[in-house]
Image (tube, helix red, strand yellow):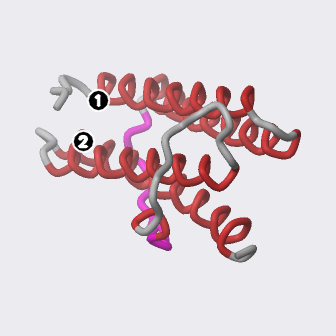
């Protein structure tokens, strides 16, 4: 696991993770089979761009007093099988992969918070875990609305 030397190092890492998510959703949008799917994946990419911008602002303005909030967890991501990404991915498959990515990011930041060297680093990782939890909830709600309710 990566050793973080500073709060700025943590934020740089998190911004890289957000950029990876932007790239992921942009690729899904590019390969989407319908204009609706393309639009939704482009929206997800824009949201991730917003998250990266928020982290950039935190870094630039050194805003380390971050809000804490309780985020609901539908736990849908705990019970779905995740498909391999292919060229002809369906919307429900993409949501499953997105839930898995956000859950993995949440677990990573939670683990990093547990082993953080100081309170400031712990708080940054807890904030990032909270943000990833919100992302996962967004995908779980989307999955519940457009996949589970249709079946």
Q: Position of residue 79 (x, y in %)?
A: 43, 69
| Viewer-nearest residue: 42 or 128 | 42
Q: Residue at x 64, y 63 (%)?
A: 143
Q: Position of residue 66 (x, y in %)?
A: 42, 49
Q: Main secondary structure of the magenta part?
A: loop
Q: Quadrant of residue 2?
A: top left
Span colored in magenta: 63-75
Q: Which residue is mark 1?
A: 7
Q: Residue at x 68, y 37 (%)?
A: 88
Tag of residue 120: 2
Helix or strand or loop: what does disc 2 sit on? Answer: helix
In the picture, the quarter occupied by the C terminus is: bottom right
Circle 2 residues within 10 Å: few <14, some 14–19, many ≥20: some
| Viewer-nearest residue: 71 or 95 | 95
Q: Residue at x 77, y 45 (%)?
A: 40
Q: Is residue 82 above or below residue 13?
A: below
Helix or strand or loop: what does disc 1 sit on? Answer: helix
| Viewer-nearest residue: 130 or 33 | 33
| Total tally of numbered discs in the picture | 2
Q: Position of residue 12 (x, y in %)?
A: 38, 22
Q: Residue at x 29, y 29 (%)?
A: 7
Q: Quadrant of residue 64?
A: top left
């Amino acid at each position: 696991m990566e050793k973080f030397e500073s709060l700025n190092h943590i934020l740089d890492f998190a911004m890289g993770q957000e950029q990876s998510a932007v790239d992921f959703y942009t690729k899904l949008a590019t390969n989407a089979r319908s204009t609706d799917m393309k639009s939704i994946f482009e929206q997800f990419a824009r949201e991730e761009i917003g998250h990266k911008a928020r982290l950039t602002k935190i870094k630039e303005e050194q805003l380390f007093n971050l809000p804490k909030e309780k985020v609901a967890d539908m736990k849908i991501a705990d019970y779905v099988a995740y498909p391999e990404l292919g060229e002809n991915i369906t919307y429900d498959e993409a949501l499953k992969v997105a839930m898995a990515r956000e859950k993995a990011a949440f677990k990573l930041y939670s683990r990093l918070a547990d082993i953080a060297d100081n309170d400031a680093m712990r708080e940054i990782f807890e904030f990032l875990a909270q943000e990833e939890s919100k992302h996962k909830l967004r995908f779980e709600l989307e999955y519940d609305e457009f996949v589970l309710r249709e079946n």
